[in-house]
Amino acid sequence: MLGAEVKKRRFGVGEYHRMAEAGILGEDDRVELVHGEIVEMTPIGSRHHACVMRLNRMLVEYCASSEAGHYIVSVQGPLWLDESNEPQPDVAVLKGRANFYEEDLPGAADALLVIEVSDTTLAYDRNVKLPLYAGASVPEAWIVDLGRRRVDLYATPAAGASGPLSYTSTKSFGEGEEVRSLILPSLVLPVREILGGVGGP
């Protein structure tokens, strides 16, 4: 037994969806498909939840403006990147569709901005999910670092030997600053408003 090789069974997006349709994965299961593996997502704490709600409010207000009215805000919804990856970013700003993606899920080409809120998941968001977004050519990603109380902005996916795997433009914004999107026109959000109260649970 010591020399036995352990093999992992990886799934495609189609199989992943059929598992949900068959009831193997329920609507209340917090999972996402990453590199063909079904990953159980960390339970959401109150600080994380509050930050997501603040981002949702600010981005909906932005998208309701006449200049940005053709965008849609998705909160913790699936984003199809490729046959092996369908993560659920905390917040995403998508290209507008009249049917609100009723007939098919939004894909990487529909995403303009994805945001991950990191409380206990910073290493996972930075080392696993960020390269996924870059590899799918999502033009801009933010990581809201609740521990260090800052927002890191990543833009311009860089082509590697096997395609885009990282972002060439990286900026960090502290509490007294404003995050200025490089992709979405006139989107400027105060970091302090994104983070909320100091150190609260």
Image (cartoon, rainbow, N blue to C red):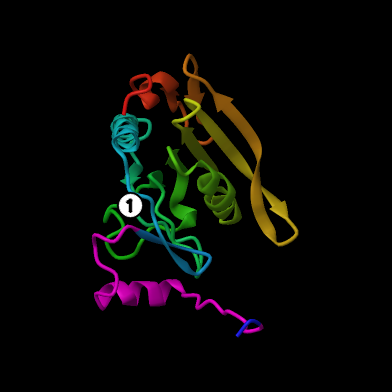
**The magenta segment:** 3-30
* Corner quadrant of residue 6: bottom right
Instruction: Give coordinates of residue 136: x percent, y percent.
Output: 56, 56
Which quadrant is home to the C terminus? top left
Q: Secondary structure at mark 1?
A: loop
What is the count of numbered marks?
A: 1
Q: Foreground residue, 176 or 25?
A: 25
Q: Residue at x 63, y 81 (%)?
A: 2
Of all residues, the one furthest to the front in this rendering is: 2
For image coordinates 53% across by 76% down, the residue present is 8
Query: Disc 1 designates what residue?
Result: 97
Secondary structure mainly formed by the magenta segment: loop
**Dot 1 amino acid type:** Arg
**Is residue 98 rendered to the left or right of residue 3?**
left
Crowd rating for badge 1 (residues with CA inside 10 Å; few <14, some 14–19, many 20+): few
Corner quadrant of residue 47: top left
Q: Identify which residue is drawn at 35% across, 37% down.
A: 48
**Which residue occupies the foreground of this view, 130 or 121?**
121
